[in-house]
Structures are given as structure tokens and as C-alpha cells.
Image (cartoon, coloured by chain):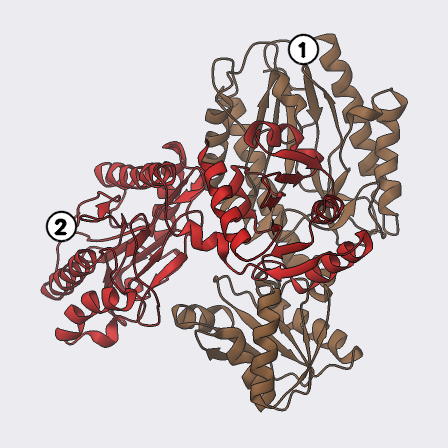
Chain colours: A red, B brown
Amino acid sequence: MSRTAQRRDALRATAAAQGLDAVLVTNLLNVRYLTGFTGSNGVLLVRTDGADLFGTDGRYTTQAGTQVPDVELLVDRATVAALARAAVQRGIGRLGYESHDLTVDGLAALEKVLADAGGAELSSVRRAVEAQREIKDDEEIDSLRRACTVADQALAELATEGALRPGRTELEVGRELDARMLQLGAEAPSFETIVAAGANSAIPHHRPDSTVLRDGDLLKLDFGATVEGYHSDMTRTVVLGHAADWQREIYELVAASQSAGRAALAVGADVVAVDAAARQVIVDAGHGEHFSHGLGHGVGLEIHEAPGIGQLGAGTLAAGMAVTVEPGVYLPGHGGVRIEDTLIVTDDEPELLTLTSKELLVL
Amino acid sequence: MSRTAQRRDALRATAAAQGLDAVLVTNLLNVRYLTGFTGSNGVLLVRTDGADLFGTDGRYTTQAGTQVPDVELLVDRATVAALARAAVQRGIGRLGYESHDLTVDGLAALEKVLADAGGAELSSVRRAVEAQREIKDDEEIDSLRRACTVADQALAELATEGALRPGRTELEVGRELDARMLQLGAEAPSFETIVAAGANSAIPHHRPDSTVLRDGDLLKLDFGATVEGYHSDMTRTVVLGHAADWQREIYELVAASQSAGRAALAVGADVVAVDAAARQVIVDAGHGEHFSHGLGHGVGLEIHEAPGIGQLGAGTLAAGMAVTVEPGVYLPGHGGVRIEDTLIVTDDEPELLTLTSKELLVL
């Protein structure tokens, strides 16, 4: 049985437990997760009796046949409406839907179609598929591993070639990093690549601009690659030319915090406690106010997904979760350091997917 | 007055005409359009009295200050809730919202916040901002022009360097095209680049794979660049080595259809009639069934936006609209040709933004 069929079965069990006859999955990433379909229009009806139905439009007939060979196909330009109509015609009385994805207008249209077709009762399944997606299976972990390898390799090549040197601009470095990841097999960068030099490195989410890299700068690179839809996420901070004492000091501090955060990644650990384990190191050094964001987040088909690991998070870690650990210390006007890895929570030590060294690199 | 301030004033007028005190803009592209903000979390309250409020979270405090200097800033992690609360506190009684963007869960949360804050009446403004966005101003057209130039230049360079030759794979060509666009200043490809060789060219939306380009193949390239958030969209079909008669024949047919479609782009023209002008050429040649999609679509901050130009479209063209014209003839199992430009509708001739030659290129 394919991984996607297994995932549909898991959703089927959730739907049955909620007394539903079927779930209409409209979130496109959830549809991809449950079917493997990568087009821009796809809707899935998962039925508790197993007779699922996949809907798309005429642009994707061939692609749907290849990517979703094991689900009955319905081709219609008005995909959600056609699938809802088919559901009622095939006897679905209680239909689950994704209230976090469907818009207000979308729900109104769906209610009208259902009523016109003879009626069905709607009930939200909330984030049932997202909850499944928190635990990655082996195929997903393989994709994440490849995505992390592409990012590792792109950075290694640029560093070796001397691309990270004084005189270049943030924007040039960012574009080169993006282009290299594509050459190495990424479908796209995971998000808008952050390249932040000198004082800009103190801005957590700086957009690369025409700032010129200078000798003595901290250079913060936060970037990732997308492979088979899965996102890698890594931050490394290097120093150009020579490192000043204050730079070494905050680097070592962030590295120690990051190490403590990684060590706290265990099955059953509370996400607030994981954040605290890393944060305490920075607080103890008197820099608590300079670590202004959460410790990390889940990563997968989205760059940010559940679980959030932070002071406002909730829940515990489980084996198979893919998460980032990314503390930072930012000294406004001077510079900042962030160190971030992507890891898999396991019953044993967490598996590190981003393998670039975390020793302070002076280029 | 900045372009973004002018756009907010136009929305303000729409809101006033609907008897609203303010509009809560949650669609992130609409927020970008109205403010210039490019971060991943931004919400805008446009008030009829002019005292607008822009909300984001702590990651973007600096960026919001730079990109949105002329709107009062509210920083809060729970951005929509904070903005809604502020609206009620500042006397907003009738609040417009985007029912095509806000999810069912989002509306429930918004209703609760408003009720807790003392109450306000909600009313959908539908796609009011999208309607504004159909007509591009000069800044937007400049961005589109640059995006089209990047795509033109990337293709020209690859063709000159011999990158489009037998022996290479679709995936290699696609990645090279993407990387070249980034080097030339694109923020990203506009969408997943289509490279389709031989029989694959008959699949309208083929995903590039390991198919090897061969002598005598039709090679269809559908791609674009994003510059300042604006998307270009162009398709060219070339032949490798030598062109067979049937290939020349459908190429000339599609070129004639595309020319007819471009000629029909006039202020006041009905979108169904524009589609028909191009389609009739293909129907007359007996290939009507092989042109299986609409003629074109609006393009801007999204790769597909209003107006749709097709048999199921509605409405008329206006000066300043940016649209594609992209007829195709697809012969299943053999090959297909599509030719697509991005153009601006004007009171005179349409302005062609994608300047790559449409003569049949034999490489």
C-alpha cells in the first residue's frame, strides 16, 4: 500500500470516529499529502467506506492519472462544487470540511451546492490532516534529508569558491545561493533567503539589499531548499576577515543555547520546556531581551507548521516530528547571531538533517 | 502622494460608498498592493476618515517602518484580533472584510473579538481590492516590464549558448532557465517552469521530467520571472534540428490565432469576444478540439488574476489591464504548440511586454 493510501486510511479512521461519512479536503497541501498530486487545483473526498474521489480540472487530467492512480478521478472546472454534488448523489449524509481552509464565500457556495443536490450535514474536521502531518513518515524524512543536503552543499560550494567575501552585496550572495540550490536539484528556495551583513544581522528577518559585505562583518544566512515539496531550514552566521571578541562571545553563547535546545528534543518533551532549555542559557548570560522570538517550529510541506516550539507553544514532541532549533542573540545597531538546524525527533537522539558545521567560520 | 496612498484612497471611496466606516484587508497580496509591505504577516485597516492602521508582528517592526512609513503601525502577534479590537476602540461601527479571503474559522474568531470589544457590524466588501488591481498603474507596469525583460533575456542567453539542444533533459533546461532568471534579477520564477519536449509538448501543463530532448522535437517553454512581486508569463515553442511540415503547419496556425487574439485586445472589448477572435482561427482550420483551454488571463501580483479571457469569462477590457494571450494546439501523442505574450491594454494598440520573437525558431 502506498504511503498516500496509508495517510488516507488514517484520515478515514478520524472521520469515522467523528461520525462522518466523508471529509472534503480543500487545503491544497493536505491534498498533496494525501494523494501525491502537485498541481494547483485538487480537491479530495475521503469516504469512510473507502470509495474516495479526487477532483481536478482539465489541465491536470494526465497528471492526475499519473500521480493519483489509485483514486477515482472526477474532472470538472468547478471542482469543489462537482465533488460536493457527487458526494450527495453517492449517499454522503454527514460531510466533514476544513474550516481553517475554506473561506467564508467558499462555505456559502458549498452549502448552496449541497442543498441543491438534496442536502448533507456539514461539520468541521478542524486541522485533522495537519495533525497527521506533524509526524513524518520515512518517505517524508527522505525528502527532508535531501532538501537539507542541497542547502548544505550550496553553502559549502559558495564558501569554497570565495563567494562570501567583502565587496559583494547581500543581494548578490542571496541570488547566488538560490541559483546554486536550484542547480543542485531544489525545486525552489524554501522561503525568501535571508542574507544580513554587519548591523543588518541584528534584524531577525532582514531582506537582503544592496548593503556591501565588509571586513569584520557578521554575516547571517538563513535559507533552505524545497525538494519534493519538503522544506529545509538552516541558519549559519559567519564572520568575514577576523572575529572581534564580542562577536566570538555571542557566537559561543548562541551555539551553547542551540546545543541545549537540541539536547532537549525528546519524545514527550513539552515544547515550552524545550524553548526554556535553550532560552535559559541566553538569559543566564544577561541577553534574554536580545532573543526576541520562539526557539523553533515544525517543518515539512510548509516552512512553518506545527508544532511551534516557543513560550506560547502547547503540546509535547513525538517521534517523527521534524523541527527547527534556532536561537539568536541580536544586538541592535551592532550585529546578531542565529544558528539553526532542522532535526527529526526520535526515540533516541534527534537526527540532525542540516550537517553544515556549527564551529565559528571566519572567511 | 505615493502610489500606495492613492490605492488606499480608492478603497476608502469604495468603503464610503458602501456605508462602511472601515475595511479590514486580510489578503496578504491586497495588503502588499495597498501598502508596499512584503512580509509574511500584515493586515490593514483602511478607514473612511483616513486614519488607517497597519498591523504586523515583532519580526517585521523594522521592515514595516521602512516599507509602510505613512500608516500608523500596530505590532501584535495576534495581528487580526489586535487590529479589530483597535477598530472598535476607535469608534468603527460598520466594518468591511474580505469574505473571499477570511476562512470560516477566521470569521468566527473575528466575530468573537468584535463582540468582546463592544461590537461592530461586519459586512463583506467581496473582491473590492482585486477589482482595483485589475487596472495597473505606471509603477506596476514598470515592474511587469522588468519581469518580462528578465524572462526574454534568460531565454535569449540560453538559446545563444546552445543550452536548448538534443541530449539534455527537460529538467536540466528548466532549472537552467530558473537559475538564469534569478541571476538576471528575478526574485523567483513566476510559477513552476514548463519545459515539454516531443510528445510531452502536447500536454498543456506538463511538469519537466527526465525526458531527453531529441532532434526533431517540438520544445515548449512556458515560464516567467517575478520582479517586485509582479509576474511575467511567456510561452515559446521551438523546434530542435529541423521542422517537419506538420510542425510548421500547427506553428503557423497558432501564431495566426495569437496574432488575432492580440489584435482583439481593445478597451471595451468583451473577454468572450477576444477569446473567440483567436479561437475561430483554430476552429476554422479544423483544430478546435485541440485548443482545450482559455485564451488568457490577467497577470500582476498573482500569476493568474482577473480578468479571465475565455469562453466562460465575463466583462470587458479596460486601459491598464495586464493580460496574457496564449492559444495552443495540442495533438495528443505527437506534440503541441503554444505561443503566449504578456501585454498591456491601452487606448491605442496593446503594449507588448514579452519581446522574444515569435518566428518559428529552429535550434
Q: Please name the residue shown 89% across and 42% down the image.
A: B273
- Residue placed most toward the observer, B91 or B346: B91
What amino acid type is highlighted by mark number 2?
Answer: Glu
Report the disc number at residue A359.
2
The location of residue B142, given as percent across then percent down, is 62, 52
**Would you say A266 lies left or right of A74 here?**
left
Residue furthest to the left: A245
Question: Is residue A344 depicted above or below B235 in this figure?
Answer: below
Q: Which chain carries label 2?
A: A
Report the disc number at residue B243.
1
Categorize mark 2 by other alpha carbons within 10 Å: few (<14), some (14-19), many (20+).
few
Secondary structure beneath dot 2 equals: loop
Q: Mark 1 lies on which chain?
A: B
Q: Which of marks 1 and 2 is in front?
A: 2
The location of residue A228, given as percent across then percent down, is 44, 37
Categorize mark 1 by other alpha carbons within 10 Å: few (<14), some (14-19), many (20+).
some
Question: Is residue A21 depicted above or below A202 in this figure?
Answer: above
Report the disc number at residue B206.
none
How far, Cα to Cα, is label 1 from label 2? 57 Å
Q: Do the residues labelled 1 and 2 touch (CB within 8 Å)?
A: no
Q: Do labels 1 and 2 share a chain?
A: no
The location of residue B300, given as percent across then percent down, is 65, 51
**Would you say B76 lies left or right of B216 here?**
left
